[in-house]
Image (cartoon, rainbow, N blue to C red):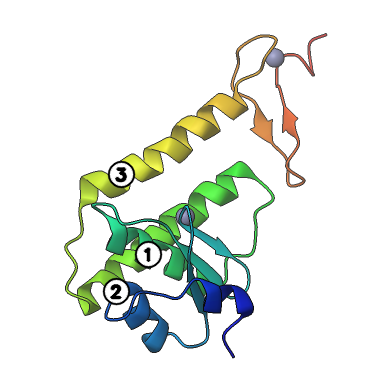
Amino acid sequence: MPSKKNANNPLPPDSFASKLQSDFKEFTFRTGTKFAFRFPKTITLGPEEPFYELLALHELSHALLKHKGFKTDVERLKMENQAWDKAKELAKNYNIEVDEDFIQDQLDTYRDWLHQKSRCPSCGLTRFQDSDGVYHCPRCENFT
Ligand SMILES: [Zn+2]
Ligand SMILES: [Zn+2]
């Protein structure tokens, strides 16, 4: 059953999005302002752009890999890596060219983000995150 939202915002016929929808009926594809996956079944496809198909396959990969959420930022980066590996696999089935530079750029934004977040605001040292997602600074917490 298509959701009400989906009915208001139908996938363009004969588009890559509607092809994915018919190949992966277990998920709900919808169009939106940006690419996203919401566990467990909703895949939002952003506007047309040069790497539209790859980005769509990336979000589909999050769905196929059942990526629910993450406790730590390292975990998040790992999920992003896994989803890109899966997207590359899927790209072969759809004859979509894999642009490795684009993928590395996408991952770099997460790497930069991780790097910035892990920096201790008081001393600048790289902190570590425990299993609950709390950051600890090895210098400030041990030597003050
Ligand atoms: Zn992702
Ligand atoms: Zn510190």
Q: Earlier in the sequence, mark 2 or mark 1?
A: 2
Residue under pointer 3: 104
Q: Amino acid at mark 1?
A: Ala
Q: Name the residue nearer the viewer: 59 or 122.
A: 59
Residue 65 visible within the image: no
Q: Which comes sooner in the sequence, label 3 or label 1? A: 1
Residue at disc 3, secondary structure: helix
Question: Residue, x 30% and y 49% (percent of image)?
Answer: 103
For label 1, the residue is: 56
Q: Residues within 10 Å of mark 1 (few under 14, many from 20)?
A: many
| CA–CA distance in space, label 3 to label 1 | 16 Å
- Which residue does the image show at 52% across and 28% down from the upper left? 115
How many angstroms separate mark 2 from mark 3 (CA)? 23 Å
Q: How many marks?
A: 3
Question: CB under 8 Å between callouts 2 and 1?
Answer: yes
Q: Position of residue 3 (x, y in %)?
A: 61, 81
Residue 121 percent location from the top left of the image: 67, 14
What is the quadrant of residue 107 in the picture?
A: top left
SS label for mark 1? helix
Of tags 2 and 3, the one toward the viewer is 2
Choose between 105 and 55: the one closer to the eye.
55
Ligand 2 sits in quadrant: top right
Q: Nearer the viewer, mark 3 or mark 1?
A: 1
Residue 32, relative to residue 122: is it above or below? Answer: below
What amino acid is found at the position of numbered circle 2 in the picture? Phe
